[in-house]
Amino acid sequence: MKQYGLSKELHETIANQLYEAERKNSHIRKLTEQYPQITQEDAYAIQKIGLERRLKDGAKIVGRKIGITSSGMMKLLNCNTPDYGYLLDNMLVYEGNSVKSSELNIPLLEGEIAFIMGEDLKGPGVTPAQILTCTAGVVPCFEVCDGRYENWDVTVIDTISDDAGAARFVLGGKPKRISDIDLRCIGMVIEKNGQFVGSAAGAEVMGSPINSMAWLVNKLSQYGDGLHKGDVVLSGAFMSAIPSKTGDFYCLHVDGFPALTLKFE
């Protein structure tokens, strides 16, 4: 049974506050300070209301993002589970184009592997083996997270309410079959302004990005949702998010793929 600490009226109010903060590039005080009784179920309800408002504005769902997939991030946010949010068509930045810093509050960059779904898939009970058979291909990607909270001082409940920080994403242009890659061992290196800033392997993402994908599909089933053919899913960051600003230039290297670049302007 779902546990709510807030009323439906408060869900609507908070979702509207987050929507307006995103539209105006402003901030609100984190929800867990304003409403100590808020639960994860409240947070997903608020997220869904915010999504519906954006869909009414004309946006279209193109996929999902998974967040908080590493043990380090779970410890940092004092939680024991990932979270998810929705990707919309107006979040997609085509390879070779720039991200406009002026459209964001506190941009943070992450390197990930994106899955392109080849079939519909819905839980519960989905296994990693089913992820393997239902994935059309995978590509490296940048995710640019953003938030409507001051100084990115958040808990997992705050991030869930704010669409898990989804803001922008950039996909590599040359997908590979998942059967041709060992996603647990695949390596990733990120350079910022020509300087090395970090490296990691796919095992940082819940042991393998395939595991985070299985988690997502089963979690979505709790809300009567699933993935569809053609959906893009960002499977989780290999390493910590990197604060970014105007003028920053990034290069993402993933074993066996062409380098992916992104500039903030």
Image (cartoon, grey):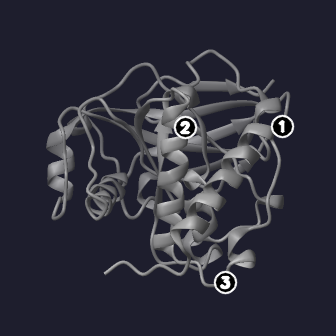
Rendered location of residue 247, percent (x, y):
85, 27
Q: Which residue is depicted at the point 55% across and 52% down?
A: 163
The answer to which of marks 3 and 1 sits earlier in the sequence is: 3
Q: Badge 1: few (under 14), some or many (20 or more) residues near its Cα, within 10 Å? A: some
Residue 133 is drawn in which quadrant? top left
Measured along the vertical axis of the image, is residue 134 above or below residue 241? above
Badge count: 3
Rendered location of residue 203, percent (x, y):
41, 59
* Of 176 and 24, the residue lying toward us: 24
* Of 5 and 90, the residue lying toward us: 5
Q: Which mark is residue 54?
A: 2
Amino acid type shown at disc 1: Lys
* Residue that carries the numbered disc 3 in the rendered image: 36
Measured along the vertical axis of the image, is residue 170 above or below residue 107? above
Q: Secondary structure at mark 2?
A: helix
Q: Secondary structure at mark 1?
A: loop
Rendered location of residue 223, percent (x, y):
31, 60
Q: CA distance from mark 2 to mark 3?
A: 27 Å
Determine contact: label 2, label 3, CB under 8 Å: no
Q: Secondary structure at mark 3?
A: loop
Q: Badge 2: few (under 14), some or many (20 or more) residues near its Cα, within 10 Å? A: some
Q: Nearer the viewer, mark 3 or mark 1?
A: 3
Q: Which mark is residue 245?
A: 1
Q: Which residue is depicted at the point 26% across and 49% down?
A: 226
The answer to which of marks 2 and 3 sits earlier in the sequence is: 3
Q: Could one spot residue 70 in this view of the protein? A: yes
